[in-house]
Amino acid sequence: MATTSIWAVKDNLDRVLNYASNPLKTKETDSGYEYEGLENVIDYAVNDDKTERQLYVSGLNCHPSTVLQQMEQTKRNAHKEDGVLAFHAYQSFLPGEVTAETAHQIGLELAHQMWGDDFEVLVCTHTDKKHFHNHFVINSVSWTTYKRFLNKHADYDRMRRLSDALCEKYRLNVITDPKKGVHYSEWQAKKQKKPTRRTLIEDDLERAIASSRTFTQFLQYLKSIGYDVKTNVKHIAVKPPGAPRFFRLYKVRDDGTYSEENIKKRIIEQDLYFEKRTRIKSKYQYHGNIKKAKKIKGIKALYFHYMYRMGIIPKNVPSRRKVHFIFKEDLRYMDRITEETTFLCKKKINTIEDLENYESEISNKIEKLVKERRCLYNKVKRCRNLERKEMIQKDIETISKEIKDYRKEVKLCEGIKQRSLKIKDKLQTVKEQENKVQERSSKERKRNY
């Protein structure tokens, strides 16, 4: 089984050539192969165990020892010395699946079939890892036609198919069902168990299915919470509020859970077994006088209102209101928002002016502590008494901790100032979208009457 990939080299051609043909990577370490460089390719030497000394570096339409000069000359001849310098591809095998000789032979055949007619290619087999793998450095300009290699999707597909065919030829396993990797940010969010845009869409789709008795109602529900829905296309697509692009329903999950057919099936099944739920009246007890309670204002009120719209507060109270998608996206930053809100409450900060004054006060304290610590550092250098020196160092540690805590508060102040502006924009955006939805629904009601 071989996996393949290819990418462009734009910064330094010499660097990638040196990496691909690195002697530490291309020698057969287990058998004690050694050589002095690319210029001196040693064919083989026979000892009692019949071990060969080989260098798994080959040039296609070029010589390994002068490959850099040849590639550069081709570019000069074509007057194409700018842009993409080369393409770097690799072909990796499972540990123990092939020998170094077989891996290199497969690499050479792949290079011949893929680029042999037009391009200079350096083929190197790395044996420094348990899995042997081939590196290909392909000149971006053809030495025969002087045309560029564009590396389109079709080129990579062809490379993968040729690699699979060679694996079958040499009786190696072939990947029959390749899985598409997820974006790093999505993988990291799943690892940290944080919501992603895709998981938030799934949550809304589940709510829409549970709230609908027909597929039309399902689409209407999504529109009512601010989604754009494309229905006059082959595959229905949805776009959450604020998202840059549409998501096809059947592609939201890899297993096709949200395909049109599966959604309709689930709606019908839940309609068949739907039981009328008895409404439970909630009882709440209030303590104190609400009329005499101080009204929260300013930036603190902004944060509390935003957390309410996000569904974070009130705590432990089941919420029946719909949470807008734009607010849901910030659930991934819930810990940070909660920390900032707690900070505003503890420090009794109500307005931006209060926040800026507190930040200025903390900055002055940090400046004084830094000067004090600098003096202590100088004392430590001059001090000859060990006991006195230890006491001064403890004072430095205490001051350093204070400075660290104050700097965290300054960072929180900066974060609050930036986030408050974003919160205002998001609240305004959602308000405008909700007004549009209400106007649309009122027009539809008038039309029905």
Image (cartoon, rainbow, N blue to C red):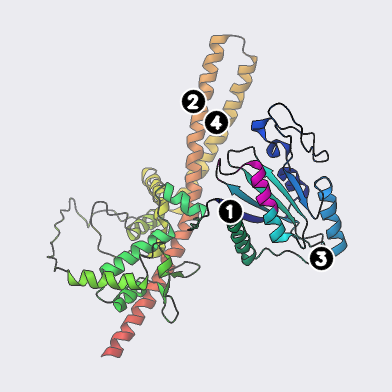
Other-residue count near label 2 (Cα within 10 Å), few / some / many at <14 / 14–19 / ≥20: few
Please tell me the numbered disc located at residue 369: 4
Q: Nearer the viewer, mark 3 or mark 2?
A: 3
Q: CA distance from mark 4 to mark 3?
A: 66 Å
Q: Which residue is mark 1?
A: 167
Q: Nearer the viewer, mark 4 or mark 3?
A: 3
Work out whether residue 8 can be spotted: no
Three-letter residue code for mark 3: Tyr
User: Around disc 1, counting alpha carbons within 10 Å, would you say few (fewer than 14), some (14 to 19), or many (20 or more)?
Assistant: some
Q: Residue at x 47, y 35 (%)?
A: 405
**Mark 2 element type:** helix
Of the two numbered discs 3 and 1 on the same chain, state the one appearing first in sequence: 3
Give the quadrant of residue 448: bottom left
* Segment tinted magenta in the rendering: 94-108
Magenta span main SS? helix
Badge 3: few (under 14), some or many (20 or more) residues near its Cα, within 10 Å? some
Q: CA distance from mark 4 to mark 1?
A: 67 Å
Q: Mark 2–mark 4 contact, CB under 8 Å?
A: no
Q: Mark 3 or mark 2: which comes first in sequence?
A: 3
Question: Residue tagged by mark 2?
Answer: 398
Residue 233 shown left or right of residue 442 in the figure: right
Q: Where residue 367 sits: x, y (%)?
A: 57, 35
Mark 2 or 4, closer to the camera: 2
Amino acid of disc 4: Leu
- Which dot marks residue 146? 3
User: In the rendered view, would you say 30 is above or below 381?
Assistant: below
